[in-house]
Image (tube, grey):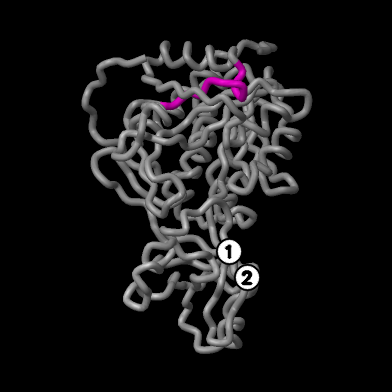
Amino acid sequence: MKRKTKKTTPPKPPAFLEELLKARSPSGYEEEAREVVRARVEKVADKFEVDNLGNCHATLGTRGSPTLMLAGHIDELGLIIKHVNEKGFLYFDAIGGHDRSMISGRRVDILTRKGIIRGVTGKRAIHLMTPEERKRVPEFHQMWIDIGASSREEALERVTIGDAAVYDHGFEILSGSLATSRAFDDKSGAYAVNETLLRLAKAKKPTCKVVAVSTVQEEIGTRGAISSAHLANPDVALVVDVSHATDHPDADHRKYGRFSLGGGPILTRGPNIHPGVFDRLMDCALDEKIDVQIEADPRPTGTDARAIQVARDGIPTGLIGIPLRYMHTPSEVIDLNDLEAVVRLMVAFARSLKRGERF
């Protein structure tokens, strides 16, 4: 579905989104992002709770029907400290799926009980490598974090084995409505589901019950979605995550499809998606004059939708993608207009539900 779109003034970056992006929340260490969600949503929601795994559940219309679950994950990629050598250098492993070629030479924030410790990821300089070594991507044990310590004892006074770290790459407008940051995957999705609830609360509430869930531990196996879907017990669910924009060099559309920044939300079709939910999203997009892009996925998707769909006795599930370039790198890129369109689409979907409706 493609229409001519008018040129508009670049959108103002949502403060809520920027706060989520500043929060450091690698999988299993999501407290900072959780508190951002709580501060923004708790006072507006009819009910707010955090489950035992750490998912935030914000509910609007506790007696509404059907129950609509909106899910976006607040965790991000990270590193975890696993060893400190005698000279005070920290060795680490990955939290989530990293491209190892991107890791060295980055400034990082290490989350410790005493506060944030700054560090730099390092490896052997290219000048000290053989021609063959220069062609190889370093393994994790060949990289480290330098915190300026001179000994193991000094380092362990500041950090502890098991402390997590994230890159220090903040939010910035790239050009017009294009923005870059670490962790758009999936702070943008978490923003979208919570912002949808906030907008629904401002006007006449929908007849359905809305549960906006900020899920945890998606990057290490959609773990938070498993427990949150059980607790929310929805009749229908929408998951928001980032999806690959393929409008850059070296993207074969025959293999990956054709998706662009500014082209609108990406709606997935395939076994992971309930056809009735997909059709309703398409109808809402048409009614709201929202351009959408369609992605075919023949398998369970790599998102929370895969866990939510098969929770309890099965949940009709839809998946909305935010087009994104450079996924799982320190500088991901989205179009803020696409993000706004995702929120508008979910608001329309919630308002389209009739009391007691089932898919």
Most foreground residue, 140 or 64: 140
Assign a secondary structure to mark 2. Answer: strand
**The quadrant where residue 291 appears:** top left
Q: Which residue is mark 1?
A: 93
Which image quadrant: the C terminus?
top right
Indicate which disc residue 82 carries: 2
Write the residue at 53% across / 68% down.
110
The question of residue 336 being in magenta is answered with no
Q: Could you tell me which secondary element the residue under label 1 belongs to?
A: strand
Callout 1 amino acid? Asp
**Which portion, as a residue range, is magenta?**
265-274
Q: Residues within 10 Å of mark 2 (few under 14, many from 20)?
A: some
Residue 89 higher or lower than 187, as above or below: below
Identify which residue is drawn at 39% across, 58% down.
169
Q: Position of residue 285 (x, y in %)?
A: 43, 16
Outermost residue on the right side: it is: 313
Q: Main secondary structure of the magenta part?
A: loop
What amino acid is labelled 2 in the image?
Lys
Residue 298 on image: x %, y %: 56, 24
Q: Is residue 311 above or below residue 219?
A: above
- Where residue 85 sits, quadrant-wise, is bottom right
Check residue 273 for magenta coloring: yes
Q: Residue furthest left?
A: 7
CB under 8 Å between discs 1 and 2: yes
Q: Quadrant of the N terminus?
A: top left
